[in-house]
Amino acid sequence: MTVRNLEDEDIDLFVVLANATGWSYEAADAERLLRLFPGGFFVSEEDGIPNGYATALGFGAKGVIGNV
């Protein structure tokens, strides 16, 4: 398994996976968060096929790890 930064072409996958786990995201929400936290979204891959995601967002001295 490899982990890489989420990119624009991954947004549709992110929305599908997030909604499957009970989060209510639309593509516009994901695009906005990606712009605000460009280093905070990750995609996991197995043999080059995306299979999951995680978020790690910083807020000053605090942060949150979510959507794992």
Image (spheres, rainbow, N blue to C red):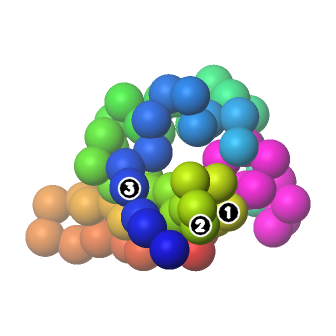
- Can you give x and y, in whole percent of width and height, for residue 67 in the image? 59, 68
Q: Are marks 2 and 3 in contact (CB under 8 Å)?
A: no
Q: Residue at x 66, y 47 (%)?
A: 14
Residue 46: which numbered mark, if any?
Answer: 2
* Residue 3 location, quadrant: bottom left
Three-letter residue code for mark 1: Asn
Check disc 3: other Cα within 10 Å, few if <14, some if 14-19, many if 20+: few
Q: Are marks 1 and 3 in contact (CB under 8 Å)?
A: no
Earlier in the chain: of badge 2 and badge 1, it is 2
- Disc 3 secondary structure class: strand
Residue 12: in sight, yes or no?
yes
Real-space Cα distance between discs 2 and 3?
11 Å
Q: Are marks 2 and 1 in contact (CB under 8 Å)?
A: yes
Real-space Cα distance between discs 1 and 3?
12 Å
Bounds of the magenta segment: 14-22
Q: Principal SS element in the magenta part?
A: helix
Q: Is residue 27 left or right of residue 57?
A: right
- Can you give x and y, in whole percent of width and height, for residue 20 in the image? 86, 60
Q: Is residue 60 left or right of residue 59?
A: left
Q: Which residue is mark 3?
A: 4
Check disc 2: other Cα within 10 Å, few if <14, some if 14-19, many if 20+: few
- Can you give x and y, in whole percent of width and height, for residue 34 in the image? 42, 37
Residue 54: in sight, yes or no?
no
The label nearer to you, 2 versus 1, is 2
Three-letter residue code for mark 3: Arg
Q: Which residue is mark 1?
A: 51
Q: Residue at x 37, y 49 (%)?
A: 5
Earlier in the chain: of badge 1 and badge 3, it is 3
